[in-house]
Each structure stands twice: as structure tokens, then as C-alpha cells.
Image (cartoon, rainbow, N blue to C red):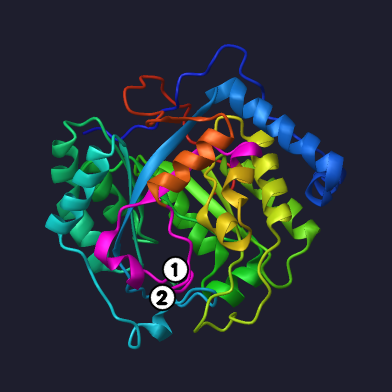
Amino acid sequence: MTPETTAPAAHPGTPAPLRLSREELLAALRARGEEQRELHAAALNVKKRVYGDDVVLRGVIETGNVCRVNCTYCPMRRDNNRDNSSFFMSASEILERAGHIKDAGINVILLQAGETPKAAAVVLEALPRIVAHFDGAVEVILNLGSLGYQSYRRLREAGATTYILKHETSSDLLHAETRFEKLSQRIQEWYLARDAGFRMGTGIISGLPGQDYESLADELVFLRSMDPDMISVSPFVPAPDTPMADVPPGNVDDALNFLALTRLEHPHALIPSVSALEKNASGGQGAGIAAGANVMTINFTGDHQGEYLIYGKQRYVVKTEHVSRVLARNGARRAGSVWVGSSARRATAPAAAR
Ligand code: SF4
């Protein structure tokens, strides 16, 4: 298989990316009341011009909960590995769960796990079987952490098409304090994965300690240089058994305004309305759809769901019924992958920021 990067066919009259000044970004991030409604309506209008009423559904399988990284906000951090009940799905288990996703009429599969070579190896084994099970008509997204160029190539050649490697924050200091890695390393990995032929997703956490509106504006400017195919924003969720358990949750309005701005600045991006929005505010995911998001993810992890502690045991697990309600309330309709069957080719990857 030849790795390639493609974009969905643009609808006629596709809006150009907006480039707001710093003052405009700051005002939009702070918007509340009528100004906020106008911001979200403008973002929704852009989303509709590109994607109509469609919201892409994807099914996530969390394939393992052991991680070699030690993020201060995550209960699956390395320091907790010994105390957590650990699991790795086998390739056959992953395939079985992928079958449930196919049966649900969904053709986008997200495989995610804590960062370990073992999790990547099992996914590598499962990938050709998943692709064969869907007769090739499937988009497989991976979220397995920093693995290095050769691993990305193998995973791409085995049939995965998209890779999510979130940098979470583009602040050197905050990145080092929360992830104990250099931001530059993470960004280098992101471009390595892109060079290996993946479409690329990234994401940030809003509401981290020390962040302010200036920092969020910095994040939006940073995203311009990356030009990702997918962008997520998750309001910070304080999780038990982490050094950040007592930090207040991230403000959902801030996250929604950030989401709306990503839509205005990246009209074609796939932008999920994430479960953290719902966790921090009931109705948060519907508000995300109303602010320009066009992706929702349904959990198909099955028996191991309770052991995948991304926000602790009390996380909000998204089910099909919830997604159906959110879509109905927002006049949206479920859709499949924008990539499967698309022949449009993306321009070459931007060289900026490498
Ligand atoms: S957020 Fe991801 S990389 Fe960080 S500790 Fe948790 S599972 Fe590992």
C-alpha cells in the first residue's frame, strides 16, 4: 500500500480559513452571552458549508491501559501502572470489537492505548484483519503515542490511515511540567508520523493550571503552522490518583469558544465533540456540535471499559443512544468517514515548524 495523504472533496463555495488577529482571538475566547452565540453560529455556518448536517461517527476500542509516560493529569500514568488492573487486548479481541463497530454501521475505527511497544505490536497484528473484515472500506485511526518513524511506517502499511498524536499544550514549560517530555520531541514525532503517510490529528487540553486566554490564543496560532487534519480540544478533567486531582475542572465555555475558533481557522478539519465536554457539563457535547464540531465517538471497548482510566472510573462513556439524542437535538445526521472512497489528494505536508 502506498502511503498518501488525501482530503475530502470540498463542497462548492467552501469558506477560506479565517485568520483572526491576536486581539480578535482574545475577544472571541472570552466571549459570553450574545457574542458567544454569534461566534458559535458563525462556526456552525462554516461547518455546514463544508460538511452540511453530517457528523462523522467513529467507534473507539481502547486496546490497553499500560503506559510508559507519566502525564500528571492521567490515572493511567506510569507511576500508577503497578496499582491499576492492567490489560492488553489480543488481536482477536480487537477484531471482535471491530466487528461490533461494523455491525453498528460505522466505518471509522479509532484504536487507542497507553504508549507501549506491546500495544503497538498487537494493533499491528490486528490491522490487516480489520481491513479485510471491512473489505478495505474502513478508516482506521490510531492513537498509540510516540513510536518512531519505522513503527509509523509499519502501521501505515498495515492499513491504518490516520494518526492522532496530541501535543496537549504548546507551552514548553507546561508541556515539560505535565508530560515530562520536551514539546519539540512531541512535535518532531508528529511530523515523523505525517512523513510516514498518515493524515494527522492533534489536540490540546484547555484549563490546565497556569493557562490563560493569552495561552489559548498561542495555541490557536501554533495550530496554524501544523495544519492538522483533525483537531480536538478537551477541557481539563481532574482525575483521582493523579497529582492534579485537586485542580478545578476546565471551563467548558472556554473549550467551546476554542472549538469554534478552530472551525473558523480550519474549515475542513475533523473536529470531535469530546466526552470531556459532557463530563464537565451535561449537554456539553451537544454544545460542541452547535459550535462547529463534526465528529462523535462511540465507545466499543466492552468488558475492559472500566479499566481504561483516562479520566478515572467516573469518566463519561459515550453510547450510541446518547449520540443519537445529541444529533437529533441539533438537527445533525450521522455520517461515515469523509475519507473512505474519497479520491481527492491533499497538498503536500507543510514544511513549516519542522
Ligand atoms: S495521557 Fe496518554 S500518554 Fe499520558 S499517561 Fe495517560 S495514557 Fe499515557
Task: Tell which quarter ligand 1 is in.
Answer: bottom left
- Ligand 1 within 8 A of label 1's CB? yes
Q: Is 293 one of the magenta-colored residues?
A: yes
Which stretch is magenta? Answer: 289-318
Which disc, if any, is residue 43?
none
Relative to 120, is 85 above or below?
A: below
Position of residue 206 in the picture relative to residue 192 (left or right): right
The amino acid on which the numbered mark 2 sits, given as a three-letter code, is Met
Position of residue 94 in the picture relative to residue 52 (left or right): left
CA distance separating discs 1 and 2: 6 Å
Position of residue 155 in the picture relative to residue 29 (left or right): left
Relative to 249, is 274 above or below?
A: above
* Mark 2 crowdedness (10 Å alpha carbons): few <14, some 14-19, many ≥20: many
**Where does the N terminus fall, quadrant-wise?**
top left
Which disc, if any, is residue 310?
1
Relative to 192, is 271 above or below?
A: above
- Ligand 1 within 8 A of label 2's CB? yes
Residue at 68%, 56% (x, y): give it.
252
Mark with earlier residue (1, 2): 2
Towards the viewer: 194 or 67: 67
Q: Is residue 284 visible?
A: yes
Residue indicated by mark 2? 76
Q: Secondary structure at mark 2?
A: loop
The amino acid on which the numbered mark 1 sits, given as a three-letter code, is Ile
Towards the viewer: 197 or 51: 51
Residue at 20%, 47% (x, y): give it.
127
* Mark 1 crowdedness (10 Å alpha carbons): few <14, some 14-19, many ≥20: some
Q: Is residue 24 visible?
A: no
Relative to 182, is 45 above or below?
A: above
Q: Where in the figure is residue 193, as x and y percent of width and height?
A: 39, 49
